Image (tube, rainbow, N blue to C red):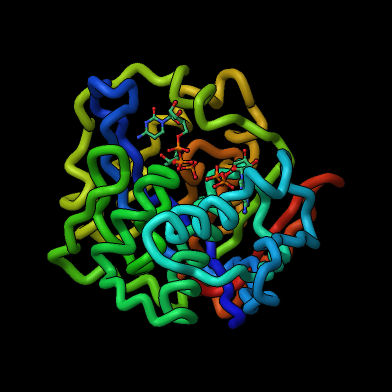
Amino acid sequence: MLVFPNAKLNLGLYITGLRPDGFRNLESVFVPLPWSDALEVLPAAKGTETTLTLTGLPIPGEPATNLCKKAYELLAADFDLPPVQMHLHKDVPIGAGLGGGSADAAFALKALNTQFKLGLAPEQLESYARRLGSDCAFFIHNQPVFAHSRGDMFEELDFALDLTGTPCLVVYPGLHISTAEAYARVVPRAPRHDLRQSLREPMATWRDTVSNDFEEALTPFYPVLGDIKQQLYAAGATYASLSGSGSAVYGLFPGFSEVPDLTWPAGYTVWSGQL
Ligand SMILES: C[C@@](CO)(OP(=O)(O)O)[C@H](O)COP(=O)(O)OP(=O)(O)OC[C@H]1O[C@@H](n2ccc(N)nc2=O)[C@H](O)[C@@H]1O
Ligand SMILES: Nc1ncnc2c1ncn2[C@@H]1O[C@H](COP(=O)(O)OP(=O)(O)O)[C@@H](O)[C@H]1O
């Protein structure tokens, strides 16, 4: 079975409090981004071990600690799963605020559920995904949604947020900011705006009413984040922001027939397409 784990963008992100479990409560709207890895899951010979082979971008850590392997082990603890051969081709930058690893884990759960007819409902898959990471569960349903708590509980949007077809440019400057470091730099506070109320308004208003708390906290330490954002606005973006804990910065270009062709420094990875 071959699946294509897509990434995500955060539309607004407010870190609102510290939880007893040491995690933070947050509010954000997660939106799928069609920048994808490729994951193949094939049955392996009886009596063999489950294996994971990797191509594409190098992933820190041993294959045994990869989130795809952890997803298999999670289900194998509850179901009599045969061994499988998994192959992951990595194209989404790692630790970029795009949820790449989390998506791989969630798509591994969905692929195994289908391949071996486990009969798990989406809610059950979301429960397994929550055990693999805070933004894994989003990728089970994989539709725009309001996320809260650890970023792993969802409320359907009660308004039309139709970004389908919107030209989008994602710029990753090759700067790895660990999620833990990013969270440590943000002081939780009440959101300055009601995110869902802001997103009901025209996109042209979002520049002043939809923000990412990580961006405000990290930009003084990593000025390149602000430089990229300004370049996207100068190129005509209606809205631009850091995604998640970064360091990927995205721009939305509604009304453009295609994304402007800009030049970026060596070492940057750029994705352009339509949401
Ligand atoms: C920041 C966000 C926002 O969408 O996305 P990315 O920027 O990673 O894409 C997510 O919260 C990332 O989720 P994920 O990458 O799964 O984080 P986890 O592995 O669960 O946690 C990594 C570390 O981040 C911190 N953490 C994460 C989530 C949360 N709600 N509060 C936290 O304090 C904790 O220190 C935790 O040990
Ligand atoms: N399949 C995977 N793809 C990417 N990162 C993975 C994977 N499995 C484990 N990881 C680990 O997860 C972390 C990055 O997770 P990722 O979701 O890509 O970050 P972000 O959500 O910031 O984009 C890295 O520390 C990486 O070593």
- Residue 117 lies, in percent from the top left, at 39, 82
Quarter holding residue 161: bottom left
Is residue 42 shown left or right of residue 250? Answer: right
- Residue 213 lies, in percent from the top left, at 38, 31
Q: Can residue 233 be seen?
A: no
Q: In the rendered view, would you say 67 is above or below 126?
A: above
Residue lying furthest left:
158
Residue at 60% across, 72% down: 273
Is residue 153 shown left or right of residue 52? Answer: left
- Residue 86 lies, in percent from the top left, at 67, 68
Residue at 67% across, 69% down: 47
Quarter holding residue 174: top right
Q: In the rendered view, would you say 229 is above or below 143?
A: above
Nearest the eye: 157 or 123: 123
Image quadrant where one finds the N terminus: bottom right
Residue lying furthest right:
266
Nearest the eye: 233 or 17: 17
Q: Tag count in the figure?
A: 0
Nearest the eye: 228 or 36: 36
Residue at 49% across, 61% down: 252
- Residue 100 lies, in percent from the top left, at 57, 54
Q: In the rendered view, would you say 48 is above or below 174?
A: below
Is residue 11 shown left or right of residue 168? Answer: left
Residue at 70% across, 66% down: 48
Query: In terms of image quarters, where does ligand 2 lie?
Result: top right
Q: Can residue 74 be seen?
A: yes
